[in-house]
Amino acid sequence: MELGLNCSLKQEVSMRQNLSLRIEHNKMLEYGNLGKLLECIAESPEIVEEVVKDRAGNTLTNSDNKKNTMAMLSFFFDSENGTNKKSSGLIMNGGLDYLEDIFDIEEVDLSADVIYEAKKEGKPILHFNDRLIIKPKLLNIQISKEFENTRNVYAKILKQYQWQAEKLRSVYNLIGENQREFIGSLDKLHFNKYNMDDLAEDLGFRSTSTAHRLIDGRRVYVNPVDGEGASYFVKDLLKTKDKIREIYTKDKLIKYFLSGEDRIDVLFDWQLRKNLRLPVARKTISKYREQLGIPGSSKRKEIYCTRK
């Protein structure tokens, strides 16, 4: 009986550790410049070492702003009586952005992760930002043995950085392949159906939540075949069938009303659906029309009569 209880306890501890490690991994996805963070840690390993020792000794005070900020590092590593608990998997209690206050990291880089250079035929050429290319020096940095805790922190963040950079490059290659028509023209009617579920499946993720966190807030820049380029959030390049229908329908409605044809024969929504061959229900057309600020048929008749 006692043996069974011990096994159950071990399983429960293992499950909690795995869960907290996954939470920690997901939180790290929200940080966009792990490469810069690694450089700062390598340049000032004593800061990380101080954080771990302070946390182990419980010497942090609420009044010490800098140390509280530095304590954000402690969710990478746990220490108790000088013993490293590498598998403890602490649940993070904050974002890595707070580390800017410690290391004096410059303000967040909002430049594009990748520039798509469209081609008339075939997949666009991708030019990746330096932050998606692991610098060889980061792989070869040797932190002094006297900073053992810092070495563990560095190794953990580096592993995450390698994973993140690889997955993001895969994301942009997949989007370049699936949205090449839009990238070539920047015409919203050329969007293909490729959504977050598709992306998560192609990346081998079990759920879309990881894909959401991976691309959250990230930007790309598109240079079409002709015309000026434009910046986009990555999520705005992922479209469902419903979103594509919405884009198509609104575009047709806008062009129709701008043409002035409605003045000649004011159409009800069901007539708009039929005459313009719109791929949505009548009530959906009413909703989109209202979103575009276009009044109903009776109100439009009044407006047209007044203007005559």
Image (cartoon, rainbow, N blue to C red):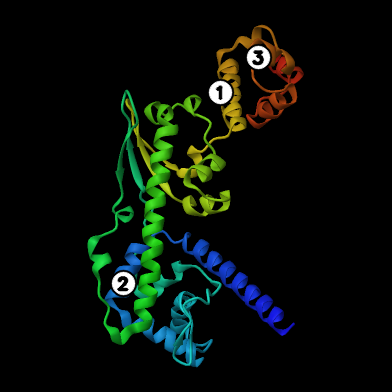
Residue 232 versus residue 178: which sits nearer the camera? Answer: 178
Residue farthest along the right direction in this orientation: 298
Which residue is rendered at x = 56% and y = 51% of the image?
206
Q: Quadrant of the N terminus?
A: bottom right
Res 117 quadrant in image: top left
Compute the Cα span from label 2 to label 3: 67 Å
For label 2, the residue is 40
Q: Amino acid at mark 2?
A: Cys
For label 3, the residue is 307
Whichever of callouts 1 and 3 sits on the residue coming sooner in the sequence is 1
For label 1, the residue is 251
Compute the Cα span from label 1 to label 3: 25 Å
Q: Secondary structure at mark 1?
A: helix
Residue 193 versus residue 260: which sits nearer the camera? Answer: 193
Nearer to us: label 1 or label 3 = 1
The answer to whether 179 is drawn above or below residue 156 in the figure is above
